[in-house]
Image (cartoon, grey):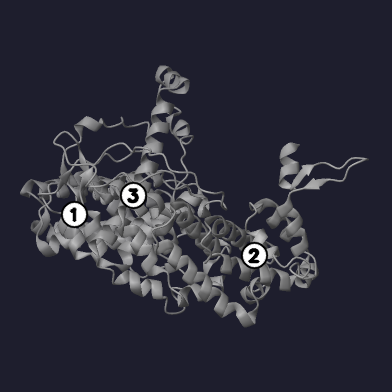
Amino acid sequence: MAQVEKRGGLLRKSSASKKPLKEKVVLMYDEIFMTEDPSKCSPRFWEELFLMKVNLEYLEGKLESLDGEELMKIKDNINCLFQHCIQALGEEHPIRVVNALQTLCALIRGVHQKNKSTSGFDIINMLMGFDKAELCMKNLMESLDSLLCAEGSESLKSLCLKLLLCLVTVTDNISQNTILEYVMINSIFEAILQILSHPPSRREHGYDAVVLLALLVNYRKYESVNPYIVKLSIVDDEATLNGMGLVIAQALSEYNRQYKDKEEEHQSGFFSALTNMVGSMFIADAHEKISVQTNEAILLALYEAVHLNRNFITVLAQSHPEMGLVTTPVGPVPATPATPLGTTPPSSDVISSVELPLDADVQTSNLLITFLKYSSIVMQDTKDEHRLHSGKLCLIILTCIAEDQYANAFLHDDNMNFRVNLHRMPMRHRKKAADKNLPCRPLVCAVLDLMVEFIVTHMMKEFPMDLYVRCIQVVHKLLCYQKKCRVRLHYTWRELWSALINLLKFLMSNETVLLAKHNIFTLALMIVNLFNMFITYGDTFLPTPSSYDELYYEIIRMHQSFDNLYSMEPSSTTLTPKLNPMLL
């Protein structure tokens, strides 16, 4: 009950003899929501307001309680409050600045929540007025830029980033957020880069900075020239790119750690002991209960970095020690709106080549390895639509990597061998591989392992056709590089061939059901093309002549699958996939 009174700004409930006692800041908010200018009766009204601790819930709730007509009546007062907030950002007194930043967050959120159905132009008019919008936003962005670049309070910088994230994420579709036009004109790109390139700032604010940059890059990216896309694509500062890579690696590592902790907790519990007694009949159902919230925001940032900036490819291979994350206490930050996209930033950036020197007993890792482990977890369960989209984004990132010449060079480098412990979905017909038995191999082997794992574990009624197509495309691009550069990779190709043949068998066995939703002949053609590539050009990239023998053996052993495929009548395509006649 006391909490409810607090939210309403009440210090004392009303009674027969006493009036309800409200916080002073709440009384001042009530004056703003009157039709008259509150500074008429109190000339120092605005100065006093920003010395009061902000009551975010009351201010947002008050805005939400008003209907459209009532809101229009107090539009002048809201405009005045918005303008005075911007003026307060230039004050030397930090309390005024903090309160102004929090008030701006509440105003932006409150007005957007109330006007979801209206256009962005109406929201701009309600917040600051059309005639003053350009000047207001120019002053706001300049103030935020100065606060972010100054050597001041870390709490203030955190609040600035939270305000910008609030501004960017108030609409479900970022491209419909008209206010961001002013953020495009008054760029804060350099301020974000400065945070990422400076280790102390990166430790405190790197996560928010990277997420903010990823979101700004996606504003109308296909409709108009986005200056953030242009600037990100030409960044070549090593410290900045490494800083971005460290932030992304930190966030993905945190997710991997949380998943591993939950997995170990699950395996050591009562249910695990019970399944060990009665067998692994229900192991798949048990595994579904292991769930950690995915981080699409940081995944989006990785995609934009890999896709837009070729210099970032080098960051993927930057080695660092693979060690457990250490939680470093962070100073308290004033209350702000919830982190956007439902993600929680890591507490600190501890992956630093300066702070953590390499040691002979410590397994080295890099951003790509961390991402592959993350992908192996996310792509296990695609029944959930949220994870399906997350898995799709992982495969799109892998496609960008597989298309890059330099990325392929270090993926296939025999001198860069790593032990990559991918997470494998528990299945009844196979045992879990022991971590200690993993060999050190070129990174491309881990990528192929991940693709094979996906192929084997997702042959189900809700067939993820799009993900399978992207998976086969990744394999094809890697093979094209190996053929072009004559890279003889020592890999257990038999596992890939077996997985592809089993996929063909699945497509044919479920032809009637799958054809109702998907054009399975496109996928079948891609698979047969892979086999044709092995048959025709395998002598340029298969490691030994015996590998060719194994290939022929697998195809001849499973010839019935290919014969059945030829006999199928592809109603939606004129192409019938056939093997290279060299084999026949």
Query: What residue does disc 2 label?
Result: 112
Give, as a three-letter code, the residue at label 3.
Answer: Leu
Q: Which of 136 and 516 is in front in this view?
A: 136
Label 1 to label 2, Cα distance in Å? 47 Å
Q: Which of 503 and 249 is in front in this view?
A: 249
Pointer 1 or 2: first along the chain = 2
At which x and y percent is residue 20?
A: 84, 45
Label 1 to label 3, Cα distance in Å? 26 Å
Select label 2 or label 3 by which is in front. 2
Query: What residue does disc 3 label?
Result: 503
Evaluate if marks 1 and 3 touch, with contact meaning CB atoms under 8 Å apart: no
Q: For mark 1, does the 10 Å Cα neighbourhood hold few (<14), some (14 to 19), or many (20 or more) residues? A: many
In what element is the residue under mark 2?
Answer: helix
Give, as a three-letter code, the residue at label 2.
Answer: His
Q: Residue at x 14, y 49 (%)?
A: 416
Q: Quadrant for residue 527, please give it.
A: bottom left
Q: Quadrant for residue 133, please give it.
A: bottom right
